[in-house]
Amino acid sequence: MLEAARQALGGATRVLVVTGAGISAESGIPTFRGEGGLWEGFRAQDLATPQAFARDPELVWRWYRWRRDICNRAQPNPGHLAVARLEQTHDSLLLTQNVDGLHPRAGSERLVEIHGNIDTARCTACWTLTPIAELDDGVPRCPRCAGTMRPHILWFGETYWEGTLDVGLAFAGRADVCLVVGTSGMVTAPTSVAMHAKRSGAFVIDVNPNTSEVTRFADAWLKGPSGELLPELIGAD
Ligand code: APR
């Protein structure tokens, strides 16, 4: 499988990469649906919703500050570094579901953070984006209009911000290889981008220690942790 994937990548011009929480697992960030995904007895699915924020914004902000702290203290692992290296050898685009900021910190520049970013807040009234580091504790207020600020994260039940997926879909239609890493595929939009790449003729590689929704239609399943397999697939410094 690794050899077939290597060959496909070696012959590819355009590579679409889609990543999920699993690529950051080896950096110590708990995945959403795996062990360690709980906080004070809450599941992520119960806190990352507009309803949870409407009910108890203080609780949701506390959870996000806890997660932001974990993300900011974590370091990119060899999987993130290998993905960043692809930009030097291929025409590549990275769509990540992760909000942890580890891809940009590893050097990825051609990326779209389709679910937002843990370091950014957004005004619920006027949509102004502000770095969280510049805001007060508790439930911060917008520096422009004093509206309630929320984490700039796409929550369960919300629709993608306009245009977010378009660039990925357009690239998927022209990609030679689609490399999917560390996602359960339970969130349908990123999985459907990978499926669009497959239908358009791309060779799909799934890197995951477990089967996922992507494994079903992948041409190669590299079974194992991405921090080990991606450097083997892409090469290391
Ligand atoms: N290397 C690669 N994959 C791994 C590793 C690892 N070391 N460890 C775990 N995984 C895999 C798991 O097998 C699982 O398939 O990572 C996947 C993580 O799945 P989820 O927790 O469902 O995360 P993800 O698919 O990114 O979730 C998507 O759901 O909660 C929302 O918006 C949130 O972006 C998130 C989205």
Image: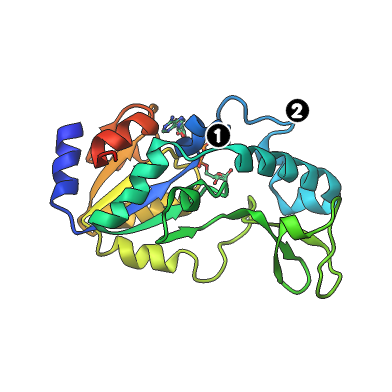
Which numbered circle lies on residue 31? 1
Q: Amino acid at mark 2?
A: Gly
Q: Could you say where residue 4 lies in the image, as x and y percent from the top left?
A: 15, 37
* Secondary structure found at label 1: loop
Horizontal relation, residue 164 to residue 158: left or right = left
Which numbered circle lies on residue 205? none
The answer to which of marks 1 and 2 sits earlier in the sequence is 1
Which numbered circle lies on residue 41? 2
Q: Quadrant of residue 135?
A: bottom right
Disc 1 crowd rating (10 Å Cα; few below 14, some 14-19, many 20+) is many
Horizontal relation, residue 177 to residue 97: left or right = left
- Is residue 199 at all visible to an observer of this figure? no
Q: Amino acid at mark 1?
A: Thr
* Secondary structure found at label 2: loop
Q: Quadrant of the C terminus?
A: top left
Q: Could you say where residue 93 lies in the image, as x and y percent from the top left?
A: 35, 59
Residue at horizontal 76%, vertical 60%?
134
Residue at horizontal 71%, vertical 71%?
127
**Spatial distance from mark 1 to mark 2, Cα to Cα?**
15 Å
Residue at horizontal 19%, vertical 59%?
13
Q: Quadrant of the N terminus?
A: top left
Q: Could you say where residue 97 lies in the image, as x and y percent from the top left?
A: 50, 50
Q: Nearer the viewer, residue 53 or 126?
A: 126
Mark 2 residue CB less than 8 A from any atom of ligand 1? no
Horizontal relation, residue 120 to residue 135: left or right = left
Q: Nearer the viewer, residue 82 or 214?
A: 82
Marks counted in the figure total 2
